[in-house]
Image: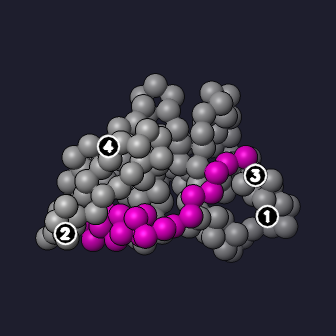
């Protein structure tokens, strides 16, 4: 592999995606995942915030996902963002704490960090959104978000809107 490429293993089936990092080009050659048939999900920060605030749309989407009994992930960036939310009540913080026990929190390692950098440079997402997108690409999952405008900039990223 050339020095200008990063190899990414997906957690789902050990398939590989090769991402070119040369000249700001993002070229996913192979990234497998079964998103269309009720696959796995990565939750954006806003999905969790709206859910704990009893937003009907967020609750409906997340409850349907949990009813499928499929893996649900959050980026460690999301974990940081939800607890940094400025209007977070003590009750909401406790609900978030309980909610996080129902998901797998994916730490940011070197592969995800490099993918996030590529996403940020190529598509202009904010760093937090880039890390969340990179986490979803790494895990081969669909992002659940209300922030579809930004995440749709990454054409390889499946999205489910809340």
- Mark 3 and mark 2 lie on one chain; the one further toward the N terminus is 2
Disc 1/disc 4 C-alpha distance (Å): 35 Å
| Local crowd size for mark 2, using a 10 Å CA cut-off: few (<14), some (14–19), many (≥20) | few
Q: Quadrant of the N terminus?
A: bottom left
Q: Nearer the viewer, mark 3 or mark 2?
A: 2
- In this figure, which residue is indicated by the disc labeled 3? 101
Q: Does residue 27 appear left or right of residue 15 in this picture? A: left
Q: Which mark is nearer the camera, 2 or 4?
A: 2
The answer to whether the residues at label 1 and label 2 have Cβ atoms under 8 Å apart is: no
- Asked if the residue under mark 4 is in contact with the one under mark 1, i.e. CB atoms within 8 Å, the reply is no
Circle 3: is it few (<14), some (14-19), or many (20+) Cα within 10 Å?
Answer: few
The residue to which callout 4 is attached is 31
46 is higher (above) or lower (below) than 34: below
Circle 1 residue: 93
Q: Quadrant of residue 63?
A: top right
SS at mark 1 in the image: helix
Indicate yes or no whether the magenta region holds residue 120.
Answer: yes
Q: Distance between the residues labelled 4 and 3?
A: 28 Å
Looking at the rendered image, the disc whose residue lies closer to the viewer, 3 or 1, is 3
Give the magenta-colored segment's residue range.
Answer: 102-123
Residue drawn at x 75%, y 52% as measured from the top left: 101
User: Which residue is depicted at the point 64% across and 39% down?
Assistant: 62
State which tag comes first along the sequence, 1 or 4: 4
Answer whether labels 2 and 4 touch (C-beta < 8 Å): no
The residue pinned by badge 2 equals 4
14 shown above or below 124 = above
């Amino acid at each position: 592999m050339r020095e200008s490429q990063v190899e990414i293993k997906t957690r789902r089936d050990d398939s590989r995606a090769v991402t070119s990092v040369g000249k700001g080009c993002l070229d996913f050659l192979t990234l497998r995942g079964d998103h269309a048939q009720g696959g796995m999900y990565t939750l954006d920060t806003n999905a969790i915030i709206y859910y704990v605030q009893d937003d009907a749309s967020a609750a409906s989407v997340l409850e349907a996902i949990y009813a499928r009994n499929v893996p649900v992930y959050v980026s460690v960036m999301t974990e940081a963002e939800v607890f940094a939310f400025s209007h977070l009540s003590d009750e909401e913080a406790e609900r978030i704490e309980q909610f996080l026990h129902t998901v797998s929190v994916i730490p940011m390692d070197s592969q995800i960090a490099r993918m996030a950098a590529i996403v940020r440079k190529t598509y202009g997402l904010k760093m937090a959104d880039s890390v969340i997108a990179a986490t979803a690409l790494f895990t081969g999952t669909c992002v659940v978000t209300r922030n579809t405008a930004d995440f749709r900039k990454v054409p390889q990223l499946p999205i489910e809107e809340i």
